[in-house]
Image: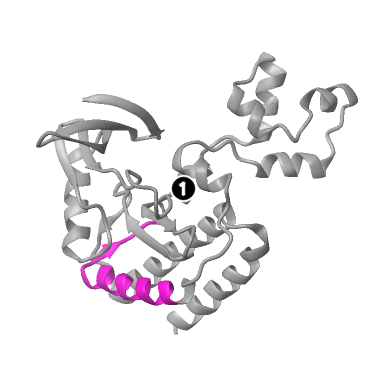
Amino acid sequence: MIPIDIIGKGAHWSVERISISDNGQEKSVVRKHGRNVDDNITTYNLVLKAGLPTLKRYVKVNDNEIEAEDLNADTSKGYFVSPNTIKNYPNCVDIFIKCINSGSLTPLESEQCKEFDFMHILKTNGFAEEVVDQMRKKKIAIGAEGEVYNNKIKFISNLELFCCSVREDLKKATSNKIALYSDAFFFRVNPLSGYIEYVIADFDCITSTDYLADDVSKENQEQFKTALLEFIRFFVVKEKQEEYIALLDDFMSLASQ
């Protein structure tokens, strides 16, 4: 096995992409290092059995490692990205504070915050609220999330049909007593067709529940809505956000009736 790159690191897991040999063929997989391995495998199998879109491969390596399908091994149809992942990336305010404290930035930090002249702001005490707000909105994104965040999606061609399809998936989750969580959803939009799809690929906060079906159904709808709203806000061009958010709001209002 040859480590390729680090995909992410959170409170419970560090995730890396590696290359392995499979019957003489090199292929890319994801290796997760962390805790709650057995619980994660159990939850994955629950999601898989319910017929929800999820990873094709998710297996225990040892008590601290899981090996999974690499969702972005082939990016010809776009990148699967997690709104939850990008929420945790620093923004240009964080980088500005780092600049004040240490005086040194990485090339990536300098490049992604280049529209803000940190030295000029320091010299002129130019802490205008508008500028700070703009800095706070600009994330320093890497990996798949960085690719999409820095090359935002221009259109989604099937959003209404997609929501209808997800509504049926949420019914499956509810009937199988699965309580979903917004962190679980990974979305991908084909840059040519604008076709959006999703998979469930994070299993830390998904639970098996005995709550009343109506309560679970409502909560699952809210978790999906939260995830898709965040996806639109982070990864879609600003000119389309209002239209797509309004469509989602209308759809979810009808779905809850």
Along the line of sight, the residue nearer the viewer: 215 or 203: 203
Q: Is residue 253 above or below residue 199?
A: below
Amino acid residing under circle 1:
Asn
Identity of the residue drawn at 87% across and 27% down = 125
Count of marks, rendered view: 1
**Residue 173 drawn in magenta:** yes
Per the rendered image, the range of residues in magenta is 161-181
Identity of the residue drawn at 52% across and 41% down = 146
Q: How is the image coloured?
A: one colour
Return the x and y of residue 12 as percentages of the image width and height: 34, 35
Return the x and y of residue 63 as percentages of the image width and height: 16, 31
Residue ID for mark 1: 84
Image quarter (top left, top right, bottom left or bottom right) of the N terminus: top left
- Residue at the farthest right position: 124
Along the line of sight, the residue nearer the viewer: 194 or 205: 194
Image quarter (top left, top right, bottom left or bottom right) of the C terminus: bottom left
Q: Determine the image quadrant of residue 73.
A: top left
**From this viewpoint, is residue 256 visible?**
no
The answer to whether residue 221 is left or right of residue 246 is left
Q: Secondary structure at mark 1?
A: helix
**Residue 223 drawn in magenta:** no
